[in-house]
Image (spheres, helix red, strand yellow):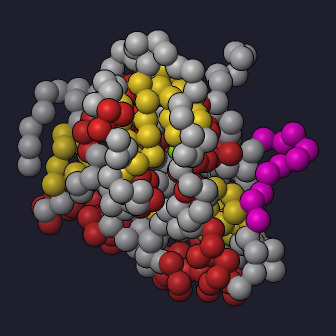
Amino acid sequence: MSSAPSGRARVLSATPRNIALLARCLRDGGLVAVPTETVYGLAACALQEPACRSIFAVKGRPLVDPLIVHVASMEMAEPLAVWNKTARTLAAAFWPGPLTLVLPSIDAVPGIVTAQRPTIAIRRPVHPAFQALIGRCAFPLAAPSANPFGYISPTTARHVLDSLGDRIPFILDGGPCALGLESTIVDVCVPENPMLLRPGAIPRQEIESCLKRPCPSSKPSDGSPPSAPGMMDRHYSPRVRLRLFPHGSAPAAARDPNDAVLLFSRPRDPITLSTPSMYWLTENGDLAEAGRSLFAILRKLDERDHAAVHIEEPPSDGLGEAILDRLRRAAAPEPGTV
Ligand code: TXA
Ligand code: MG
């Protein structure tokens, strides 16, 4: 167990002793930041209203934005929702893993978790340390991403420590997240009509080929609040100004010497390569590598004093959809600005 100055989270590795300590903390209503294969989460016992309420307070998250409930097994997931064949097919194909299913809720968790909605979002993660912790708890864990609301999602324990370290007691360190993009969220309340609420670490095409039917995006057209804040216009946002440019084209007229350029893949041209403030998401165009590095690079760029960062959009196939979604939201203007 490592020690830390008081008022700062203790960062613990996943030893059996630490897992037992963290399970006790969660059982007693405390919060623990946890590693997952997608991004780090901020977990509380999903059955305890005050514990879940403190997640919202720590993140500065509006109470209208519901939490994902994480489970260790299908047995733990069954009593939380009304299951149907489409949901079971997707769970059998992709769990444990980066897929969140939205199903009709049966009020097994306090209303604060689901933001008083009639539905519940459930995910069975594959990260071994998180699985060990939920298994040890034997109750489901509500967990949003472990970042201040609206900021970039954390993909290392250090990211969590940097932005929430003075507000939580413990961080379970499971290493850098293997995928680096949040889970794909599919609303399966109407089994014949699955809807993609958030593109994520499982590409839409994989969901569609598993179900053998289309899985269109859901966007409220009536001006009602977004059904997932991944659908809010501005999210995942660093403080530095971001501007996107189309894949394969040259960055637009950005010639402030303080500007940076973030390319999709490593440039071949040695002159471009030696340009100061030039970064890239992947060495050779691999979308999985780009997804894994995206949030860490955005954080790094935010720490430097660039006037603006010009970012090349990824190719739009496969994981590119989720990467582009995060970039567009990160680059969206703040409400009330142009
Ligand atoms: O990969 C992930 O999903 C990570 C890790 C920690 O599991 N979690 C995550 O949580 O990204 P969060 O809170 O940052 O995003 C969860 C999304 C939000 O957009 C929320 O609105 C949506 O899930 N959500 C939760 N419950 C919902 C529900 N009942 N109906 C529709 N959307 C829901
Ligand atoms: Mg989030």
- How far from the left and from the top, in percent, is residue 311? 50, 35
**Would you place residue 168 above or below residue 174 in this image?**
above
Picture quadrant of residue 213: bottom right
- Considering the whole magenta stretch, tell me its main secondary structure: loop
- How far from the left and from the top, in percent, is residue 19? 21, 61
Is 211 or 222 nearer to us in this picture? 211
Q: Residue at x 61, y 41 (%)?
A: 246
Q: Which residues are magenta?
A: 216-225
Q: Residue at x 67, y 49 (%)?
A: 228
Q: Residue at x 64, y 30 (%)?
A: 332
Is 258 or 300 nearer to us in this picture? 258
**Would you place residue 243 above or below residue 89 in this image?**
above
Q: Which residue occupies the extreme right position in the image?
A: 222
- How far from the left and from the top, in percent, is residue 232? 68, 39
Do we see residue 33 in this rendering? no
Do we see residue 248 in this rendering? yes
Q: In this image, 262 relative to 254: left or right?
A: left
Residue 333 within the segment the image draws in magenta: no
Picture quadrant of residue 333: top right
**Would you place residue 29 above or below residue 209 in this image?**
above
Q: Quadrant of the C terminus?
A: top right
Is 81 or 131 nearer to us in this picture? 131
Q: In this image, 12 relative to 277: left or right?
A: left
Residue 218 within the segment the image draws in magenta: yes
Q: Total of numbered circles in the picture?
A: 0
Q: Residue at x 33, y 20 (%)?
A: 304
Q: In this image, 76 relative to 24: left or right?
A: right
- How far from the left and from the top, in percent, is residue 128? 28, 69
